[in-house]
Image (cartoon, grey):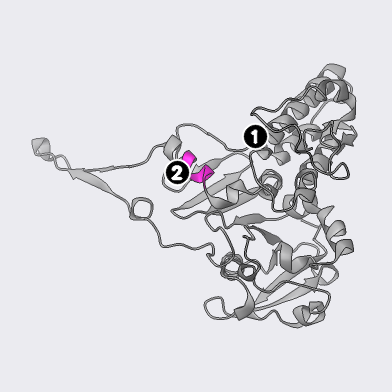
Amino acid sequence: MGWHPSRLISIAGGVEDDPTVHLCDSSGIAPGAVYTTLSHCWGPDPAAVGITTTIKNIDQMKTSIPWKELSKTFQDAIKITAKLGIQYLWIDSLCIIQESKDDWEKEAGQMQDVYSNSFLNIAATGAPDGRVGCLFDRSPVFSKSTGITLSWDMNDKPSTYFPLVFVSQPELQETFTQEPLNNRAWVMQERILSPRMLNFTRHQMVWECNSKFIFEALPKPSRDDRTIPEIKMLSLVKESESLDRNSGWAVDQYNRDLHGFWWKVVALYAETSLTKNSDKLVAISGVATRLAALMSDNYCWGLWEKTLSRDLLWTPTRKVDPSVRLDPTIAPSWSWAS
């Protein structure tokens, strides 16, 4: 927990009313301090984003961030962080200077560190934009214990309570997959890199970590049906640390597992949407950077140098218009990202 992003939001004051929040540089943060991050949808309407950090207002933001000018999603994330007893929070549009190409490029290159070093990633999973927030009215199905009580007359046996669950694991999974945030391309790497993630959906909370994926309505699922690859990034790092580097077979097998992991990520990532086509490879670069270090391989526009001849055999899984291509400066024609 020694690494911190360049900037964080510092939280103080009463959580229930208007907390006192301001932007602070990492140089002023104690080495052991933990922080949370936020995954959210910007939405098509710029007005829904609320106040952001710019070159003009950054000095003022370091003094005080106007509470009433923050979007509801940001306000909820701040309250959740404060309730957890954590002082610091990272939000992209507040911690990265907007409309500054230099600052964006610098901070975008640190995304793998921002999320992998966070204590918890808060996800506004049910919100299509900043006006909606993280906190919803709870569904009675998920927020109340419902069941039946049977009384037994024979031998004076006590009453027995049987809890009832009205939804199944596949139904919960399908509902979760359709939440607005899970269609956002950027959130793919945020989910993979974060060691823990708490999703605030329209109906319930959903917990993700390196070993569990649990719905609030079904705390003991019959199976772990993930919407992201089963291997989380932290698990890959831990496996690398225990790998016998003197065993050529073990290293080769590990690299094959990593390569397979990458293409699982790409297949899911291709189903998501981006606001800016120029972000096509940037939005997944955090995962690629971490994998490149683990595999000791060079990343080549969505493909890998050591397996390039095989990687070039990629094919679309659905019908596409071959004439529609991104600008070559975003992705070359031989990359799936084009």
Q: Residue at x 90, y 29 (%)?
A: 305
Q: CA distance from mark 1 to mark 2?
A: 21 Å
Q: Secondary structure at mark 1?
A: loop
Above or below, 118 relative to 291: below
Q: Residue at x 45, y 32 (%)?
A: 222
Residue at numbered disc 2: 219
Between residue 38 and residue 284, name the one nearer to us. 284
Task: Name the amino acid type tagged 1.
Answer: Pro
Image quarter in which the N terminus is found: bottom right
Residue at numbered disc 1: 229
Badge 1: residue crowd in 10 Å (few <14, some 14–19, many ≥20): some
Residue 241 placement (x, y as % from top left) = 81, 35
Q: Residue at x 81, y 67 (%)?
A: 99
Q: Which residues are magenta?
A: 174-178
Residue 66 placement (x, y as % from top left) = 66, 81
Above or below, 231 relative to 180: above
Task: Name the amino acid type tagged 2.
Answer: Pro
Above or below, 81 relative to 284: below
Residue 294 placement (x, y as % from top left) = 83, 35
Q: Is residue 159 visible?
A: no
Query: Which label lies toward us, 1 or 2?
Result: 1
Q: Secondary structure at mark 2?
A: loop
Residue 55: quadrant of the picture: bottom right
